[in-house]
Image (cartoon, rainbow, N blue to C red):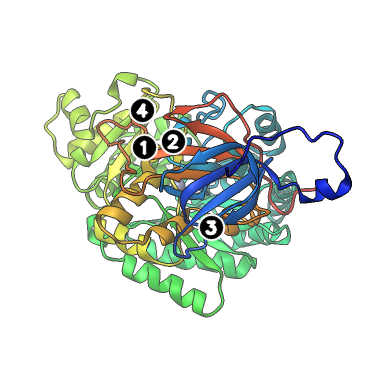
Amino acid sequence: MRFPAIKPIAALGLTVLLVQPPVYDIVITNARVVDGTGASWYRGEVALKGDTIVEVATRVSGTALRIIDAGGQVVAPGFVDTHTHARRGIFEVPTADNYVRQGVTTLIEGPDGGSPVPLAPFLEKLAALQKSVNIGSFIGQGSIRSAVIGDADRQATPEEIQKMQGLVEQGMKDGAFGMSTGLFYVPGTFTPTTEVIELAKVAARYGGIHTSHQRDDASKVLDSVRETIAIGEGGGLPTQVTHHKIIGRANWGRAVDTLKLIDDARARGVDVTSDQYPYTASSTSVGSALIPAWALEGGRQQVRARLEDPATRARVKDGAVIMIRDERGGGDPKNVQLASCGFDPALAGKTLADVTKMRGMEVTIENAAEATLWIVEQGGCQGVFHAMSEDDVDRIIRHAATMIASDGEIPIFGRANPHPRSYGTFARVLAVYVRDQRTLTLEDAVRKMTSFPAARMRIMDRGILRPGMKADLTIFDPATVRDTATFEKPHSYATGFSHVIVNGVAVFENGAMTTARPGVVLYGAGKSK
Ligand SMILES: [Zn+2]
C-alpha cells in the first residue's frame, strides 16, 4: 500500500528510525505537472510539508497525512498577479474569492503610481489581516508627488525632488517591490521623465523595478513605450509596460511597433518587459479616460470651477469629444459602460449613450461629451471602455516578454458592474488563448502567470514547482477551465479549478473556499530587517 497511515513509532532504535520513509502533509498524485518554467508537462506527484514543496517526482515514496488525487488534471504553481488594485476589497473580502477561484495565490498592489504613503502602516494592517492569499505592494510615484507638491501642473524644485526621493527610499525599506508610475493620471501626467528617473534611481538602489501605466496608450503610445524604456535605462532598473495595450481604432495595429521597441531595447541590454490582461476593453475613471488631464489639475473644486466658466467648459468639451471619438470612448458612446457611480449606484451597467438619453439629448458624440462633463460634475464614475482590437491583444500576449496580470480588484460579490478581468483574467487565458485559439501552449501560458512574474518581482521562492519552493499551487482541468464573467454579468467565478493551495494549506477545494487563511505579506529586496 502506498502512503500508509502513520503509525506511532514505539521504542525504536536509531537504525529503524533511519529507514522510516518521509512523512508528508500533502501528496498530490495522478497529476500532469506543469512546473511553471515553460517545460513540457509530465505525469507526476508533488509532496508538501509545512509551507514548502519537498518533492516533485514521477512517483513520490513516503507517508502522507493527506492525499489529493488530481485525477489527471494539471497541477501548476499558484498564479502571481503583478498588477492588482486589491486594496479595493481585501479588507472586506480577505478570502479574495474572485482571484483564488482562478488559481491566483499572490497579489501585488500599488500599481499605476498609486499606493498608500507611507507604505508601512498599510503593510502592517495587511500582515494582521487573516487572508487567503499572499500580498505585496509597490510604492506609487503619483501618490508621493501628491503628498509633496499636491496635484499641481508644475516642475518640482530640487528640494521637492529630494523629499520625494526620501519617500521612495522609505517605501523600499518598508518592503515595496519597486516604484509604480501612472503618468496617464493626475498628478503623474505633470511629471517630466527626468524627474521620474531621479526617483527610479532610488528604487534601483534597493533592488526594485519600475512599472508604468504609461502617459498615453492611444495616439502617443510609441512615445510612451520609449519613455518607459528610458526610465529603465536612466534609472538603472528593470522596467515594465504594465497592461500593455493600444487604445483607439486609429491606433490599432501599433502593437507591432510597441513590441519592436521592446525587442530592440532588450537586444541592446535594457531589461524591459510587459504585462497584459486578455480583454479588448479597459477600465478606469470616466474623468481620467474622457477629460483632458489639464482640466483635472488641482482636484474636484478646481475642476468644477473650470466647468462653470463657459469658455473653459467649451475647451474641456472639445477635448472630451476627441477622447470619445478617437481614444477610450471607442468612437461610440455605446462603447463606454459605467462600472460604479458613487453619486448614483443605479447608473452601474448603463452606457454613456444611455446617460446621454437620460439627460434628454440625442445620442451624438458631442452630446455624449456633455453627458461626460455632467458625470464628472456629479463626482464621477468608474467606467469600462471598449476601444482595443483583438489583433493587438493577440500580438501582445504571444510575445515572450509579456506576462499576465489582471489590473483587477476584489469586488464585493454582486455589487456594481466591474470589469470582468477581476474574476476572469487567468482562466480566460487558459480557456481562450490556450484551448480555443491555440495562441499559447499551456506550458507557456502558465509560465506567464507563475515563474515569469515571480522572478520579475524577485520573489525567488515561488512560481516554480521544485523542492524548496513555497507551496503555492493550483489544480485545474485544462479541458474545462473557463472564465464565466462577462461585461454584462461580471460577478461570476471562473470554473475548472478543483484545488488552490497557499503556503501548504488548501484555501479552495471541492468547489468552495475553506476556512483557512494562510496568506502572508511578501516584501521586496530592500526591506530593512
Ligand atoms: Zn493602470
The answer to whether residue 278 of the structure is visible from this angle is no
Tag on residue 336?
A: none
At mark 3, the secondary structure is loop
Q: Nearer the viewer, mark 4 or mark 2?
A: 2
The amino acid type found where label 4 is placed reads Ser
In x, y percent, where is residue 361?
14, 29
Cβ of mark 4 under 8 Å from ligand 1: the answer is no
Report if the CB atoms under discs 1 and 3 are less than 8 Å apart: no
Can you tell which mark lies on residue 494?
A: 1
Res 193 visible: yes
Position of residue 449 measured from the top left corner of the image (x, y, whole percent): 47, 53
Of marks 3 and 2, which one's residue comes earlier in the chain?
3
In the rendered view, tell whether residue 205 sits above or below residue 85: below
Q: Nearer the viewer, residue 22 or 139?
A: 22
Mark 2 — residue?
101
Closer-to-camera residue (19/130):
19
Q: Are marks 1 and 2 in contact (CB under 8 Å)?
A: yes
Residue occupying the point 28% across, 36% down? 486
The amino acid pointed to by label 1 is: Ala
**What is the C-alpha distance between the residues marked 3 and 2?**
27 Å
Packing grade of label 3 (10 A; few <14, some 14-19, many >=20) is some
- State which quadrant residue 413 falls in: top left
**Mark 3 or mark 2, whichever is nearer to me:** 3
Nearer the camera: disc 3 or disc 4: 3
Location of residue 253 in the rendering, given as x and y in whole percent from the top left corner: 26, 65
- Residue at image mark 4: 340
Q: CA distance from mark 1 to mark 3?
A: 29 Å
Q: CA distance from mark 1 to mark 2?
A: 6 Å
> Is mark 3 in CB contact (under 8 Å) with mark 2?
no
Instruction: State the residue position of label 3.
Output: 58
